[in-house]
Amino acid sequence: MARRALLVEDDAAIATVITAGLEEEAFTVDRCDRITERDRLLAANEYDVMLTDVILLDGDGIETLGAVMQARPDLPIIILSAQNTLDTAVRATDASAFEYFPKPFDLEELVRAACQAADAPTGSDEAEPDQADGLPLIGRSQPMQEVYRMIARVLRNDLTVLVLGESGTGKELVAEAIHQLGSRKNAPFVAVNTAAIPRELVESELFGHEKGAFTGAVARSIGKFEQASGGTLFLDEIGDMPPEAQIRLLRALQSGRIRRVGGQDEIAIDVRIIAATNRDLAPLIAEGQFREDLYYRLNVVPIRLPPLRQRTGDIEPLARHFLRKAAQEGLPTRTLGREAAGLLASRPWRGNVRELRNFMYRVALFAREDEIDAATLKQLLLEQPAESRPAGAGADIKDMVADWLAGSDFTPGTLYHGALAVLEKPLFEHALARTGGNQVRAAQMLGINRNTLRKRLDDLAIDPEQFTIRG
């Protein structure tokens, strides 16, 4: 079936690659690199789909889409961008884009989306939400792009979201971003650590209680569900919730109603649920510690946050951000030197973004010079509490590897290469982080041939661009 696409892209190489991919799927492709030419082509032709970059030769491709959507409300639009921030993903969603692809993108996935858009064009009559300020998430690394895309996809609906990730990765920030940028932003955002609620107080904390319901209930108390009415209820550490509390929570989610402790009337609830956990729920389900039916209720849209060691390209902008925040909160104004930034990127940061934030605040307080150099950082890193320091003893590393191997389930014949791949990846990422993404210097540091490094980076799906230090 013949289909026609308009491609608005000012990078000739990227435009050529996309055109070739679309033509393989029987698209006729018109290309341009300016907004003025885009508007001329749209006025003169009918298209099944439009693919557009954000930053074009004569303006912002998203800002000028309003008139396009008004004139052609049924034209599906796919937005491409090298401006890989949460703000861009949200702007693409606000513009009613059919799909958003950060660069670099997977060509097959892009072409597949273009085919879907052309075969089932959709318009949107929904009011566009206002652009929110003060977005809580920072980072342009490739792992964060999928997080941004997932956030953007859930802003126009109330689907339940399960945020997964290690401690300190920013799970509550994801929940706050979804709330701030979604349709419930003017209603309450209520966060509760479900693991911290004593077993005997779970019902009262979540659902409230009536006066006299139990000893000490001297007045009516409104629970978290009612406090979040019309807004978002964030259930943190859901993997540690007591089993009996899980039953009560499941019942509330299934029925959409709650009953205060000691009350007779059921109360309809209108909240969006976002849950989070740093634990792997699959083994907890297998061990009977977490209800499988509750898991499926919560895991409608999973968003997995990468640990900081998998997004080392974001460490420098995060560190600079935390120094600015520290200054806003009354600490001395500090700047980060280039060598110091490289040193930060080489650290494992087991406590993830939370550990980096706390460390940068400590740097802001104790640094002797306004510009922070590598020597200052090294000294302050040595003064970190023992539990936050990276393991330095070989015996510790061997124990960690041994524990990991003991808990791994490799199929016969794959143990050597599988374990080697897992161990190689952080090694190559460390070398790239230390050299600012310079592959020649990284290969020299590792003591291997540059071609060998390139091949292993491809095999391990490591993008050296995310380690490049930009001014």
Image: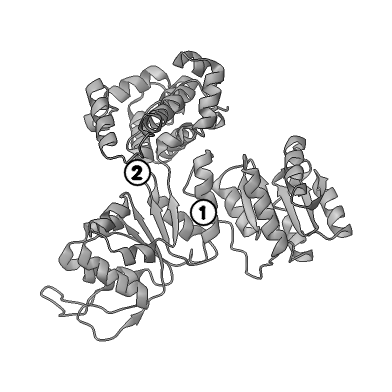
- Left or right: 233 in relation to 220: right
Question: In the rendering, at what x and y percent does residue 244 appear?
Answer: 20, 67
Residue 376, image quadrant? top left
Q: Residue furthest right?
A: 44
Looking at the image, residue 320 lies above or below residue 100: above
Identify the image quadrant of the C terminus: top right
- Tag in front: 2 or 1: 1
Colour setting: one colour
For the question of whether residue 226 can be seen, the reply is no
Q: Is residue 82 left or right of residue 382?
A: right
> Where residue 357 sits in the image (x, y, percent)?
37, 37
Q: Secondary structure at mark 2?
A: loop
Mark 2 is on which residue type? Gly
For the view shown, which residue lies furthest in the left direction?
Answer: 215
Q: Is residue 445 above or below residue 156?
A: above
Q: For residue 451, say whether it is visible.
A: yes
Residue occupying image coordinates x 74% and y 66%:
73
Q: Disc 1 on helix, strand or loop?
A: helix
The type of residue carrying mark 1 is: Met
| Mark 2 / mark 1, whichever is N-terminal | 1
Circle 2 residue = 168
Measured as percent of width and height from the top left, residue 148 is found at 52, 49
Which residue appears at 41% of the width and 19% of the height?
374
Q: Quadrant of residue 232?
A: bottom left
Report which residue position mark 1 lands on.
Answer: 150
Q: Residue furthest front?
A: 412
Percent position (x, y) of residue 15? 75, 41
The quadrant of the image that shows the N terminus is bottom right
Badge 1: residue crowd in 10 Å (few <14, some 14–19, many ≥20): some
